[in-house]
Amino acid sequence: IDQPINQGRRLLTNKHILLLLYIMTSTEDKRKPSDFPYACDIEIAFPTPRHAEQSMRIMQVDEEIGDRVQKSFSLVGDENEIVRISFQATEAKLLRVSVSSFYDYLVIALKVYQEFDRILYEAGN
């Protein structure tokens, strides 16, 4: 499904998966306690607020191991269609590993949405 279906409903396509990821990264975040000097914020735009909320609830289940990395989620944007994930870590390597693992999980979640949205759309027509 490389072409978006434009009949009142937007589906996630492979192109969407690549375009949805908007990353803001910083190596130090002055707002965070000095125990967590490394930070990364990721914003993922979804086609609908429903997709964003469901994705956030799914991704929140995967907690960080240990207490050296913290992860928080929030909905942002005019219609809450963007999920913001904020990572803070005690070491740069831990931040890199955590963000990399998150992206692996995110790709799987987006592919599931892509497939089930297509199936649900076809079943509704």
Image (cartoon, rainbow, N blue to C red):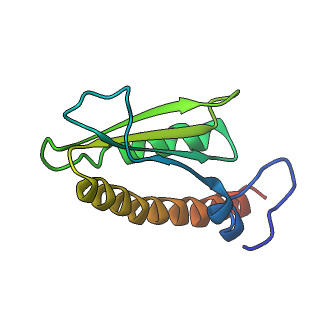
What residue do we see at 65% from left, 58% from top? 120
Report how many numbered discs are placed on residues in the image: 0
Q: 17 left or right of 106?
A: right
Q: 74 left or right of 5?
A: left
Quadrant (top left/top right/bottom left/bottom right) for the N terminus: bottom right
Residue 119 appears anywhere in the view: no
Q: Position of residue 16 (x, y in %)?
A: 69, 61
Residue lying at the far left of the rendered structure: 66
Q: Position of residue 63 (x, y in %)?
A: 25, 46
What residue do we see at 44% from left, 41% from top? 85
Task: Give 62 or 93, whichever is nearer the viewer.
Answer: 93
Residue lying at the far right of the rendered structure: 7
Residue 25 against residue 1 in the figure, above or below: above
Quadrant (top left/top right/bottom left/bottom right) for the C terminus: bottom right
Q: Position of residue 8 (x, y in %)?
A: 84, 47
Residue 30 appears anywhere in the view: yes
Residue 28 against residue 110 in the figure, above or below: above
What residue do we see at 60% from left, 39% from top? 82
Q: 64 left or right of 42?
A: left
Task: Give 83 or 123, whichever is nearer the viewer.
Answer: 83
Q: Position of residue 70 (x, y in %)?
A: 26, 39
What residue do we see at 19% from left, 34% from top? 35
Instruction: Determine which quarter of the picture holds residue 48.
Output: top right
